């Protein structure tokens, strides 16, 4: 049997139905699950002539690897991940100033999912991460992203430093984030125009080579007693400050 992608959770499956229905092979709904949100999903599925079946919760638990699937799982065609070539093609074709998010070795699925959700909400054109030492678009990531993973392009590149150099050659301003106040305040930094905001990994932050390729380093002012913010929270703060300036 051919391998398939598994997408679960009401928001993630709903977004898939809206934006990429052609990817769905079948939707499996938990027996006895009958509510307005499920009915709406099924209505979309029938409109697109997508097969729908019912199964016991145990089967859905197995498909989702014991995650909180909310009674619905979509079996999808394996989607080819976006990489270096797709990113270059997009940069060459894009007419408006790019607004990008770069995640340097973020490994936690919940953090990536939350970052994707914030990025989509803030109008980011694409999210970039290295292939190695980073989490990809797993079912758990898609669930946390609440549909954003099906909308915003996610590029996994071979060499992040090289990709940043390529962006700089095309006039993209690279803003890296630090966990201390040795850099410039986020709120004193010009975030308009062609921009890529770089967020570091959980705990250690950006890698040395990534830091060296940034045009400017910024910090988020904190007045409380906590020393730093979770990477997904910090990402939201930075992206929406950039959005505020760009409106």
Image (cartoon, helix red, strand yellow):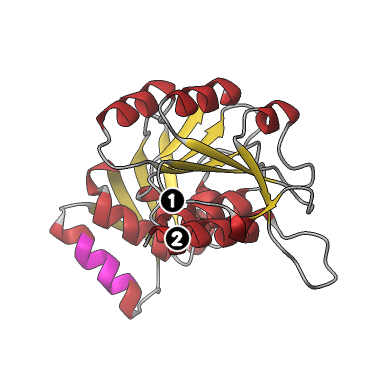
As measured in the structure, the alpha-carbon distance from the residue carrying label 1 to the one carrying label 2 is: 6 Å
Which stretch did the figure color magenta? Answer: 38-44
User: Considering the numbered disc 1 on the image, is that residue within a helix, a strand or a loop?
Assistant: loop
**Figure quadrant of residue 228:** bottom right
Magenta span includes 42: yes
Are the residues at dot 1 and dot 2 in contact (C-beta closer than 8 Å)? yes
Residue 123 place in picture, x, y as percent: 38, 55
Graded by Cα atoms within 10 Å as few (under 14), some (14 to 19) or many (20 or more), the crowding at tag 1 reads: some
Residue 114 place in picture, x, y as percent: 55, 57
**Residue nearest the observer in this picture, 22 or 31:** 22
- Can I make out residue 165 in this image? yes
Q: Which residue is drawn at 62% across and 28% down?
A: 213
Q: Residue at x 39, y 28 (%)?
A: 87
Residue hosting label 1:
192
User: Considering the numbered disc 2 on the image, is that residue within a helix, a strand or a loop?
Assistant: helix
- Can I make out residue 9 in this image? no
Residue hosting label 2:
245
Locate the C terminus by quadrant. Answer: bottom left
**Mark closer to the chain start, 1 or 2:** 1
Residue 197 place in picture, x, y as percent: 55, 45
**Residue nearest the observer in this picture, 25 or 97:** 97
Q: In this view, does 196 lie above or below 64?
A: above
């Amino acid at each position: 049997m051919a391998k398939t992608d598994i997408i679960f959770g009401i928001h993630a499956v709903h977004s898939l139905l809206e934006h990429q229905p052609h990817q769905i092979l079948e939707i499996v709904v938990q027996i006895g699950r009958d509510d307005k949100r499920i009915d709406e999903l099924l209505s979309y599925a029938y409109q697109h002539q997508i097969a729908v079946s019912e199964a016991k919760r145990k089967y859905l638990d197995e498909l989702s690897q014991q995650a909180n699937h909310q009674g619905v799982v979509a079996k999808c065609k394996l989607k080819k991940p976006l990489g270096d070539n797709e990113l270059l093609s997009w940069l060459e074709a894009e007419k408006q100033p790019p607004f990008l998010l770069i995640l340097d070795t973020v490994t936690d699925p919940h953090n990536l999912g939350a970052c994707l959700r914030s990025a989509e909400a803030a109008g980011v054109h694409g999210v970039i991460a290295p292939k190695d030492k980073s989490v990809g678009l797993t079912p758990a990531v898609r669930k946390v992203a609440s549909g954003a993973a099906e909308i915003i392009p996610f590029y996994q590149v071979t060499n992040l430093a090289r990709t940043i150099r390529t962006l700089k050659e095309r006039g993209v301003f690279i803003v890296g984030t630090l966990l201390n106040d040795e850099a410039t305040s986020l709120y004193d930094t010009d975030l308009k125009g062609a921009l890529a905001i770089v967020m570091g990994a959980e705990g250690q932050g950006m890698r040395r080579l990534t830091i060296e390729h940034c045009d400017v380093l910024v910090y988020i002012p904190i007045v409380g007693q906590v020393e730093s913010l979770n990477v997904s929270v910090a990402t939201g703060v930075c992206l929406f400050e950039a959005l505020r300036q760009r409106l």
